[in-house]
Image (cartoon, coloured by chain):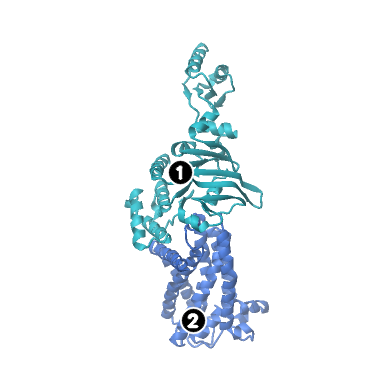
Amino acid sequence: MKSIIAQNLVKTYRNGEVKALDDLSIDVEEGTVLSVLGPNGAGKTTTVRILATLLKPDSGSATVSGVDVIKHPDKVRELIGLSGQYAAVDETLTGWDNLVMFGRLYHLGKAASIKRAEDLLERFSLTESARRPIKTYSGGMRRRLDLAASLIVQPKVLFLDEPTTGLDPRGRQEMWEVIQELVKGGVTLLLTTQYLEEADQLADEIAVIDHGKVIARGTSDALKKQVGGERLEITVENADITKAQEIIARISGTATHTDVRTISAPVTTGSIALMDALRALDEAKIHPLDIGLKRPSLDDVFLSLTGHVAEEEVKA
Amino acid sequence: MKNAITDSLIITKRQLLQLARVPEVLIFSTIQPVMFVLLFRFVFGGSISTGQPGGYVQLLMPGIFVQTVAFTLAATASGLAEDMKKGLIDRFRSLPIARSALVVGRTLGDSLLNILVLVVMAAAGFAVGWRPTASVLSVFSAFVFLLLFGYALSWTGIYAGLAVKDARTVQNVSFLITFPMTFLSNAFAPTTGMPKALQYVAEWNPVSTMVAACRQLFGLQNQFGATANSFPSQHPLTTSIFYMILIMVIFVPLSVRKYKNSSN
């Protein structure tokens, strides 16, 4: 059964000037994780906001657990949890205050709200800082508290909009562990991210979106296959770059991609290509700093699908 | 309906908790009006002749009370804008709660804060010679009246906060509105000294009618600028009630609609 179905969503801003969603359709099987992957401005947040009843699409339809998000937003709100790009909690209040307040707003009753708040604080390793104002929390702690706030009523469907954007590597790792733990509990998760690694780590399926459209969809492995097999990748001294490019181009038979001093190109013959390359480089008296066969990363997927690298778009 | 009320009260409680966690806010929001009481009382009190038994402070206190509750506009607006910016509004809107709860809760919270501030100010006024002469009931109704005025203005603040979306900007904008409004009135000086056109504006200014109404309720006969025979000077209470209803009728539906449609 599909937990989330979005069909032909269109959303424009500023009287049609900016097209955030351009006929976007996605669906998520119950109990699985779909990662919506795309650069800034691709339409990820708009998709989440429509599904979480915060925004109405110009056209198209969507259901969450079979309930129409446009016709019955109130019912949908009882089923979902949402955690946004920034920690949407009251920073002047303590972690405990926040969770109890949200429990009350879910109409849990006072005693049940307190119990639930304490359980969640425990589960997200926040018990020690429960009585401190959120503004004293680290970025990672804030995100965990924000996530906890979206889990108060054990939602069937959870939306996480860029849950690790802005976190340091350690915070990101902690967040991933928490999310993986959650998924084991059977929740249906739609997660947006601009980090390819994150999608790879957490998602059962990935939908790549760009300019408000889904441009590819499938498991991480399937997407990688779509791009092709292995790549030969070598790093050389600056002086040797041109020569090395010629050698790699000859071996792979296709154009090479050069990133600073690292040259790469797709190969079909695996380790044979690697040995050929080593021999040719040795003859040319080039000593590579690094050489190897790489399975395609989601970066490659993105590059081949959109013609641009995801990370570059982010900086722009 | 029952849920809508409890939801609103939970939001109100959140504001009180904020005050408990950051008491500085409470301290500074009471220090400012008390400072105004002292400044006006001792700086102008000696030089403005009022012909009023008990002196300038009797006329001043209603003026400062109204000015203070008028600033609720800025408080509500900046508080709401802050919530918008931090994404808190999105979280509230994704909860299965009454849509009106967040805005109703905030207007109630700001009114509760007003009660506290008014009590502190009344005490400060009392310390520097303010003595209302009317009955307890009349004085009490003046305070209720002030709270209602603050509550009505709180709804204009909701609208301003949702429209401007930036706490600092909306605070500045609100002061740009409330400052001239409170000074272009009979609150601190007689309107009779103003140019004719301004006198006209001052007489119809809701701040003036509120101040005049409170002065009546506190038991004062004398009014600054009550020489005119205009309707608002003759019937300040009626005019004030009309203004409050007008503000609510316009801004409650406007704000609720704006809130429902708001998305950053």
Identify residue type, mark 2. Answer: Ala
Q: What residue does disc 1 label?
A: A164
Q: Residues within 10 Å of mark 2 (few under 14, many from 20)?
A: many
Check whether the beta carbons of the residues at disc 1 and disc 2 lie within 8 A of each other. Answer: no
Q: Is residue B64 among what the camera can see?
A: no
The answer to whether one can see residue B153 in this image is yes
Please give the chain letter of the residue carrying mark 1: A
Residue matched to label 2:
B142
- Viewer-proximal residue, B152 or A78? A78
Q: Position of residue A272 (x, y in %)?
A: 49, 16
Q: Image height check: is B145 above or below B92?
A: below
**Disc 1 to disc 2, C-alpha distance:** 54 Å
At 56% from the left edge and 26% from the top edge, which residue is drawn?
A257
Quadrant of the snapshot with the C terminus of chain A: top right
Q: Chain B in the picture: what colour?
A: blue
User: Where B102 sits versus B223, above or below?
Assistant: above
In the image, is A243 to the left or to the right of B141? right
Furthest toward the front, the residue is A1
Residue A106 point in image, percent of width and height = 42, 59
Chain letter for the residue marked with disc 2 in the picture: B
Can you tell which of label 1 and label 2 is closer to the viewer? 1
What is the three-letter code of the residue carrying label 1? Thr
Residue at the (52%, 36%) spot, across then down = A218
Q: Quadrant of residue B29?
A: bottom left
Q: Where B164 falls versus A252 (above or below)?
A: below
Q: Which chain is cyan?
A: A
In terms of secondary structure, where does tag 2 sit? helix
Tag of residue A63: none
Q: Kindly state the secondary structure of the residue where label 1 is placed.
A: loop
